[in-house]
């Protein structure tokens, strides 16, 4: 028992040492140039997509309203009402799409399981050809397929991914959580452009100054989202921030220009 314990301890120390060495190499780039791993999270897509859409949508609305020379009260009323309405729509849309995707995957798995049960030979042949098309040697492909054929659940999942390109449904996924996260992210990020019209109330009544403040807060929010996107995807921070800011600037400029043009066409006076 003492020898086994000592061996396990030595192995644990060796593994910890190797892990530590790997972490050090990763921090300084690593001798092998190993790419940086993306941050893994269950709601990454919902946060990034909802955040970017919220900032661009809300700031574009503010830009069009400001170009039409409406008051700060109009900006706040229309901005927050639009923010909540769009947030509910986005959250519900994410919930529906996630639920549909999960239901489709479950249905496809049931169909694939039936095919594997009733037409095992044909399914094995299809998977064999799929592996060969990917460049696997015929003997190796045959060996792999024969092994998978012994385990029905594994074979069904592999058949779904290799032949249909669909991941098996994950029972741990909760579509309502995706919808809730999307709604929350939309409200949080979308509030950034509107904060200027609230924070500056005690200091100035100049709507132009408040609009400039909204521009600055929107740019900061977009930059923060760009940094988060770079961290999540393992991308270059400067490039990700630049793309995000450029997207927001184009949308805001288009909204401001359109609002100004429509104001002149409608003959609205300042």
Image (spheres, grey):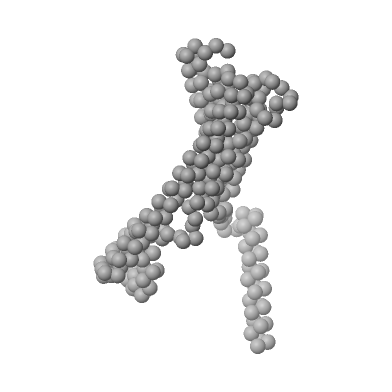
Q: Residue furthest right?
A: 203
Q: Residue 108, percent across and down? A: 34, 59
Give the quarter of the image for residue 226: top right
Q: Quadrant of the C terminus?
A: top right
Give the quarter of the image for residue 76: top right
Above or below, 132 relative to 53: below
Q: At 56% across and 49% down in the image, what residue appears?
A: 232
The answer to whether residue 262 is left or right of residue 107 is: right
Q: At 52% across and 52% down in the image, what residue appears?
A: 177
Q: At 66% across and 83% down in the image, what residue appears?
A: 5
Res 263 visible: yes
What count of labels does the image hold? 0
Q: Residue 85, percent across and down? A: 51, 36
Give the quarter of the image for residue 243: top right
Q: At 26% across and 69% down in the image, what residue appears?
A: 118
Res 131 visible: no
The answer to whether residue 138 is left or right of residue 67 is: left
Query: In front here: 208 or 176?
Result: 176
Above or below, 37 relative to 248: below
Q: Residue 146, percent across and down? A: 33, 73
Q: Residue furthest bottom?
A: 1
Q: Residue 228, percent across and down? A: 59, 45
Query: In front here: 89 or 165?
Result: 89
Q: Quadrant of the N terminus?
A: bottom right
């Amino acid at each position: 028992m003492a020898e086994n314990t000592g061996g396990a301890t030595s192995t644990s120390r060796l593994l910890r040492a190797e892990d530590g060495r790997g972490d050090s190499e990763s921090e300084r780039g690593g001798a092998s140039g190993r790419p940086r791993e993306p941050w893994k999270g269950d709601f990454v897509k919902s946060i990034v997509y909802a955040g970017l859409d919220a900032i661009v949508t809300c700031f574009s609305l503010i830009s069009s309203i400001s170009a039409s020379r409406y008051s700060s009260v109009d900006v706040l009323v229309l901005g927050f009402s639009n923010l909540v309405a769009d947030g509910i729509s986005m959250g519900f849309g994410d919930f529906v799409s996630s639920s549909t995707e999960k239901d489709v995957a479950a249905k496809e798995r049931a169909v694939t399981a039936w095919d594997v049960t009733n037409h095992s030979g044909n399914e094995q042949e299809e998977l064999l050809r799929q592996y060969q098309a990917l460049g696997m040697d015929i003997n190796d492909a045959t060996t792999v397929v024969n092994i998978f054929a012994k385990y029905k659940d594994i074979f069904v999942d592999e058949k779904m991914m290799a032949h249909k390109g669909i991941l098996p449904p994950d029972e741990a996924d909760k579509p309502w959580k995706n919808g809730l996260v999307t709604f929350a992210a939309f409200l949080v990020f979308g509030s950034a452009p509107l904060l200027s019209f609230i924070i500056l109330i005690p200091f100035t009544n100049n709507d132009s100054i408040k609009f400039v403040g909204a521009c600055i807060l929107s740019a900061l929010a977009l930059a923060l989202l760009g940094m988060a996107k770079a961290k999540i995807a393992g991308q270059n921070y400067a490039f990700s921030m630049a793309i995000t800011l450029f997207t927001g600037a184009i949308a805001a400029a288009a909204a401001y220009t359109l609002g100004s043009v429509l104001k002149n066409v409608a003959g609205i006076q300042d």
